[in-house]
Amino acid sequence: MALIVQKFGGTSVANTDNIKNVARRVKSEVEKGNQVVVVVSAMSGTTDQLIKWVNAVSSLNTKEEEAEHDVVVSSGEQVTSGLLALALRAIDVPAISMQAWQLPFYSDDMFRKARIEDIETGALTDALNKGLVVVVPGFQGITRSKRVTTLGRGGSDTSGVALAAALKAERCDIYTDVEGVYTSDPRVVTKARKLRKIAYEEMMEMASLGAKVLQLRSVEMAMKHKVRVQVLSSFSDKPGTLLVDEEEVMERRLITGVTYSRGEAQVTVTGIPDKPGIAAEIFGPLADAEINVDMIVQNISEASGNEKFTDMTFTVGKTDLDKALSSLKALKDKLKYRELITNDQVAKVSVVGVGMRSHAGLAQKMFKTLAEKGINIHVISTSEIKISVLISEEYLELALRALHTAYGLDEK
Ligand code: ASP
Ligand code: MG
């Protein structure tokens, strides 16, 4: 007998018919003789609605208010956990829902983005041993002082993986509305292929670079605890994508995926007197304002008279652009830069693959492919297993398709 964690996303439980469909899937796992723990998201759209209601009555200025936010926003998962337990009972599968406080599922007290601390499995295991399917709401936790928390948007994935790790489950199946992880976004790149396996680290890059299949933290957690995660669709019976160790990705491929993010904005600070410490002076205040800076380039400085000047270009999230600009404007007298230039019509395109560790020339292929299409690169950044470029948003789709073909990823 194996213990399986099944996690169902918002579209999989979007209405009562879908919940009945999920119940049938759970039942078929039970009929294989397995113990099953189910983690559910809220019905799709519910969390957004709950957040709107909160925002309509409060601007959440204090920690106490943020705690109430979590009381409201975690409730969507409570609803679906109870409904699924009922739907299971209706088809003769004994089931019980257990909320975060009943396990307990402990987190810290960073409301709205709490981090999991410890999951007690005693009560849950007792229920499993009585032959029950246990349905747990994703996304919610409880602090040691018994306040309800939520784990950040998309946090149910992390709940599922964390439970699988705590229970040492055989597998964590994450059911969603896509059939797995693709070499690129199939809505843009029609020749994208579903990957049978992907290395944890590749999935981590893909998740942080814009692929929205899994919450980034869930992938980190899966990698750390070596949880075998499978991403698959609750609307089809096709096999999904398995997250595995790097050594297990046997298909000989250099590049695994081409991904993108539209949420970027580019900022250039020109004519900064070039002296030691300018980077710290620019980026320190941005960090203090909790603005995440992603790609950075500094130009070679130009001499003018006795002084040297340089330009610095970097990217921030589009939603942080205004905040970044006001920070930089406040620094104008101190930094004595010439100008601030911004561009929010940009997108970041990245190619990812563990094959990069051992093969040269993969970046060159990217630059050459984009050059052949006449696409200008604004900023480049790299890590061991990814290369990212910033380009004009209008060329995004062209770039994705061209790169997908160039790296041999197209479906034959
Ligand atoms: N319901 C939460 C959200 O929409 C958590 C989740 O679905 O993973 O972000
Ligand atoms: Mg999700």
Image: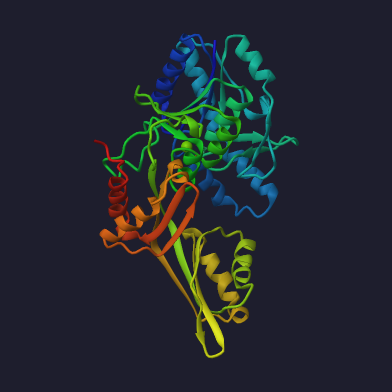
Position of 89 relative to 402 (above/below): above
Q: Nearer the viewer, residue 101 or 123?
A: 123
Q: Nearer the viewer, residue 50 or 376?
A: 376
Q: Residue at x 56, y 47 (%)?
A: 54
Q: Residue furthest right?
A: 145
Q: Residue furthest bottom?
A: 305
Q: Nearer the viewer, residue 290 or 396?
A: 396
Q: Residue furthest left?
A: 412
Q: Residue at x 37, y 63 (%)?
A: 377
Q: Is residue 260 left or right of residue 282?
A: left
Q: Quadrant of the C terminus?
A: top left
Measured from the top left, where is residue 201 in percent x and y?
51, 40
Q: Is residue 150 left or right of residue 145?
A: left
Q: Quadrant of residue 146?
A: top right
Measured from the top left, where is residue 290 in percent x and y?
61, 59
Q: Nearer the viewer, residue 93 or 200?
A: 200
Q: Is residue 123 left or right of residue 181?
A: right
Position of 404 relative to 274 (above/below): above
Count of numbered circles on the image: 0
Measured from the top left, where is residue 342 in percent x and y?
44, 70
Q: Quadrant of residue 133?
A: top right
Position of 359 relative to 228 (above/below): below
Q: Quadrant of the N terminus?
A: top right
Give the colour scheme of this rendering: rainbow
Measured from the top left, where is residue 279 in percent x and y?
59, 69
